[in-house]
Amino acid sequence: MNDIRPIRATSGTNHEGTSAHNRRVIIDALRLNGALSRADLARATRLTKQTVSNIMEELENDGLVTSRETVRRGRGQPSTPYGLVPEGAFAIGLQIDRHITRAIAVDLVGNVLIGKEANLPAGGPATGTPVVLQLVQEVRTELKLRTAQAEKRLVGLGVAMPGPFGIEQDGDDNPWMMGAWQRFPLLETLSAGTGLNVTLQNDAAACATAERMVGAAHGLDHAVCLYVGYGIGAGLILGGDLYSGAHGNAGEIGMALLTAGGRLTQLEHRASLASLYEHLGVDPMAPDIYSLIDRRAAADDPEILAWIEKAAIDLRWSVHLIETIFDPQTVILCGGAPAALATRLIDAMQPLLPSNADRADRPLPRLQLGMTDPWAVARGAAAEPIGHAFDPRFSAILKA
Amino acid sequence: MNDIRPIRATSGTNHEGTSAHNRRVIIDALRLNGALSRADLARATRLTKQTVSNIMEELENDGLVTSRETVRRGRGQPSTPYGLVPEGAFAIGLQIDRHITRAIAVDLVGNVLIGKEANLPAGGPATGTPVVLQLVQEVRTELKLRTAQAEKRLVGLGVAMPGPFGIEQDGDDNPWMMGAWQRFPLLETLSAGTGLNVTLQNDAAACATAERMVGAAHGLDHAVCLYVGYGIGAGLILGGDLYSGAHGNAGEIGMALLTAGGRLTQLEHRASLASLYEHLGVDPMAPDIYSLIDRRAAADDPEILAWIEKAAIDLRWSVHLIETIFDPQTVILCGGAPAALATRLIDAMQPLLPSNADRADRPLPRLQLGMTDPWAVARGAAAEPIGHAFDPRFSAILKA
DNA sequence: TCTTTTAAGTCAATTGTCTTGACTTATTTG
DNA sequence: CAAATAAGTCAAGACAATTGACTTAAAAGA
């Protein structure tokens, strides 16, 4: 009698879904192509001139776009391009790493306005959460002082930290593995502490998000970011969207197993900054380690070069694996590695292993260098709420 | 002056996109849950009762749904469930393999109505295309005889064959690698030869499509089908959709490199029916090879068991890799391997390697058995046009 | 048995959003 | 200076979902 089976279904949509989608499509087109006239937008989106005009008027009233100088392009009435207003929206990005946390404020077009960092005390979330909340608060306050409208145009707080999430791991007691943070109800805590919409992704995914919004993956539908940081992971842009898997752990290739020296080991143990620090015998906790590595790499320090040679073998394999499995348009090396190290790694990885990605008509290189500054992860974290609020996506048309 | 840069943008949508989406959502809900009343559908899709009623009337007129016996569920007017009409749509699926081709006809709910197979002569597309077209024509003719409406309800021809596509490979002259087929303009030829909409996917993707429509991946958003056939590949259901990559070659894990016996080799060389045939010294061209292997496996033939032991090592690694990289809800072993072999493979793969997929709250097993009959690939090929025509997808709301 | 409650489903009017076609404006071309 | 071309607006129309009142049919309770 009481048939309470849950019914599975996709949500339907209605006029508002249509309208929301079309707004996003227009914002996206302006982000990808720069300023465009209403007529250009109508052609590109296949909407009618009139529809575009109506939406543009709305967007202008909402402070998201403004008109630029008219341009004459041959016959006919000159067109009036419209461009995104950077101050149309803001987001805060937060990176939580092993011994450091960084918070930044970005605007609608991805400019970094403010960046602050702080040391994270040992002791996990119990002692770390107040530090993190304090840092976010500082950035938020400064943003408020700079731009009066910022507070009400703040679309969310994006958080990035190393994964995997929700797994009981071996060596979970090792503070470097961040197990305590990974099992902590971070979203709820930060949401309650800030009153903002909070989202979480792993650091590789955050890098991919950043590359997609303003970097080498801009406008690409299929790209994989190979993130080399303290750990190693892949951020996946598949079909135009970030892919996170069923539990947010997709792309954790650091945990992929490979046979090296006759025994099965994790990729992470062979090619990551952690393995470099170990190789060099330096303390990963040292505050200036990033610039130290950068300097030594730039000076072609033989110890570093030796590690690069070794790591390149496994990274070459990783690129081959990524190309074979994902069939992307390009692979982007990005993230926590200093620029001098990253460029040398890429050089050492040449020639890449033959793969399905060898095609005569490639418009993009198989492997390219992405962002390598220490703030890249935070930028990606900040890009997530912006993208969530403004990018065209299937779920955005569906009813709540 | 002449600024002819192409403008990149997502397409907008309008009322028809909305309506098309809502129709698809309803059909999808009926496929996933079986017959549902209009009120149930309204709740599940978040559409209003009235909207659902309007759409149901349309769908009934189009012959896609019919009412069932009314059911009393407590107080209130009894509800009238509606279910999909199997004869509402048909599709033809075509598998092209190394020495054999199979064509089937399926209906809207995935029933296989007709299946025919033929030997493919050596010589590639030049000699094979007429055979393939003939086979499709036979199935189509028989379908027409059985169901008067079938011809005008035929939504397309789905083709599946081994990948990768569009690559110049080593050993391309080897007829077993099907290089000539892979570079042949198959879509155009079949489209011209049949007048149908034709789509192409690799055999692993086809299996995943079949598992999604009527098999173990039914209703799952994140599932990977590990296809073990003459080659080995992965069919990827990511975020509710089949993922094919930038060039249709995503999931070609057979070409992934691993170190075995001290040297780098492809997974395909270690664990695939090709490697089994080689191990057994049998001719892969033998017409009854499938049942031969099935019988020998069922009888626990020691040579087969030896191969299974060896292949299980690499397949365990594959499952670990898939879980690590895709973070799916489940992995499904499916495809061209006979049932007796597949079940023994799964047993031999236990225990699986520890991975991110080890979670206390798993609702599904990490590895399960999917379809293993020789027709699975053709079924998946046939499922593609049906899914394309009736499943909710982002691209279906966009303007042409 | 009769009334009330509850739920399915319909009817008719309304609303929100895109589309259509005619029109205006501004520029280049000949 | 007229014709051609393109950007952009105006006002009416079309389409599809929504709303709220209504009808129908069954169960529950008095």
Image: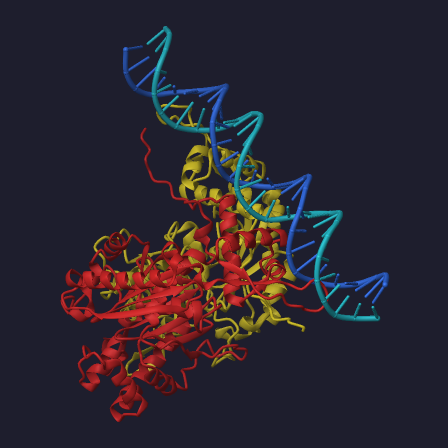
Chain colours: A red, B yellow, C cyan, D blue
Instruction: Check the picture and name the quadrant holding the N terminus of chain B.
Output: bottom right
* Viewer can see residue A211: yes
The vertical placement of A200 against B308, above or below, is above
* Left or right: residue A192 compared with residue A48: left
Tell which of A354 and A84 is nearer to you: A84
Tell which of B338 and A312 is nearer to you: A312
Measuring from the top left, give residue B150's x and y in whole percent: 60, 45
Tell which of A232 and A294 is nearer to you: A294
The quarter of the displayed image where residue A265 is located: bottom left
Measuring from the top left, give residue B35's x and y in whole percent: 43, 37
* Left or right: residue B322 compared with residue B146: left
Instruction: Check the picture and name the quadrant holding the C terminus of chain B.
Output: bottom right
Name the residue rendered at 51%, 53% in the picture: A61
The vertical placement of A157 against A233, above or below, is above
* Left or right: residue B87 compared with residue A311: right
Measuring from the top left, give residue B331's x and y in whole percent: 33, 59
The vertical placement of A322 against A149, above or below, is below
Tell which of A183 and B191 is nearer to you: A183
* Left or right: residue A307 compared with residue B375: left
Measuring from the top left, give residue B127's x and y in whole percent: 61, 70
Name the residue rendered at 21%, 86% in the picture: A280
* Viewer can see residue B383: no
Name the residue rendered at 41%, 64% in the picture: A107
